[in-house]
Image (cartoon, rainbow, N blue to C red):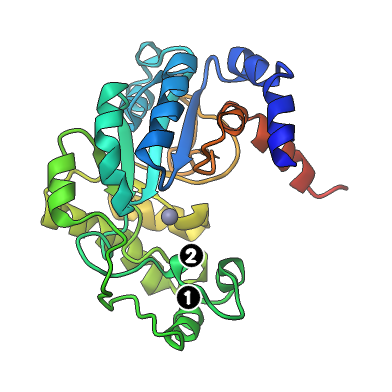
Amino acid sequence: MNKLLFKLLRYSGLPFLFRQLVQRNKVTILMFHDISAQTADRSFRYLTQAYNLISLDTYIRACRTRNAALIPPRAAVITFDDGHKRNYELVPVLEKYRVPATIFLCSGIVGTNRHYWFTRKHPDLDSSELKKVSNQEKLRILSRTGFEVDKDFETRQALSKAEIEEMKKYIDFQAHTVFHPCLPTCGDEESKMEIALSKQMLESDYALHVHALAYPNGDYGEREVRFSREAGYACAVTVDYGFNTLDSDLFRLKRLSVNDTDNMDELVVKASGVWGFFKNMAAKPKK
Ligand SMILES: [Zn+2]
């Protein structure tokens, strides 16, 4: 059903209009998670034609120096969240299309056999319900299924240390907290630690220069903005709908989810912001 809808929307001319009118003088930040090399090849072939891909760093530099010349028309920034192990297979594709990508890593999960809590299937509760309870309560519930944040499993879900070391030349690695909690459900100390320690671990264990944070699931509050500033980050990305300019709040950068799709109609529609625009409109409470 959605397949047909994406096709109709793609050829409605709306994505073209958004690219020309809305995205032309803005910076669009796109969010991926875990796509195959094949999907990446098709996606980046399209994205490099439709957009001018720039690094997150270039955008931040443009904001700090107020230099609009650093930003080409229809600029887009490519980001990946979590640090899934399959990201390793993307390097040749990213090189082929010269995509300057940022991958946000969970510092307590990469380089280990620990698992992302949201990949754990709970018999009764799905992950959207688990995001609503406090982080401590969520971990208590998940521990009954044999999950612990610091337990090493047989299989690996995240990038290994050797992979990150090898990818460092091509990829900008930044922080995505330590264990990927839903930050607003954490206590003060916990939220602060998740934000600050992630940067410290990535800098000391991988010799990375970490200046950007992606809030897990895009969930954040005033408190998280403050903690990110205090921890020394220069910016943080959300999944709030919209596009960015030189005047954007650097700790509330807007980002569009493209849903790791292999359906090119969906990619075109979502990358243009058309999908988010309608979703955002539908979600707005009526007065
Ligand atoms: Zn994530």
The image position of residue 258, as x and y in percent, is 53, 38
The image position of residue 261, as x and y in percent, is 53, 40
The image position of residue 279, as x and y in percent, is 71, 41
Which residue is the site of mark 2? 182
Ligand 1 within 8 Å, label 2 CB:
no
The numbered mark, 2 or 1, whose residue comes first in the sequence reads: 1
Query: Left or right: where does residue 123 sit relative to residue 189?
Result: right
Ligand 1 within 8 Å, label 1 CB:
no
Figure disc tally: 2
Q: Which image quarter is the N terminus in?
A: top right
Identified by mark 2, the residue type is: Cys
Real-space Cα separation, disc 2 to disc 1, in angstroms: 7 Å
Q: Quadrant of ligand 1?
A: bottom left
Q: Residue furthest front?
A: 38
Residue located at (47% from left, 35% from top):
30
In the rendered structure, are the residues bearing label 2 and label 1 in contact, judged by CB atoms less than 8 Å apart? yes
Quadrant of res 112: bottom left
Residue located at (42% from left, 71% from top):
188
Quadrant of res 20: top right
Q: Quick check: can you spot residue 233?
A: no
Identified by mark 1, the residue type is: Asn
As drawn, the label of residue 135 is 1
Image position of 10 with respect to 30: above or below:
above
Secondary element at tag 1:
helix
Quadrant of res 236: top left
The image position of residue 46, as x and y in percent, is 47, 21
Image position of 68 with respect to 164: above or below:
above
Secondary element at tag 2:
loop
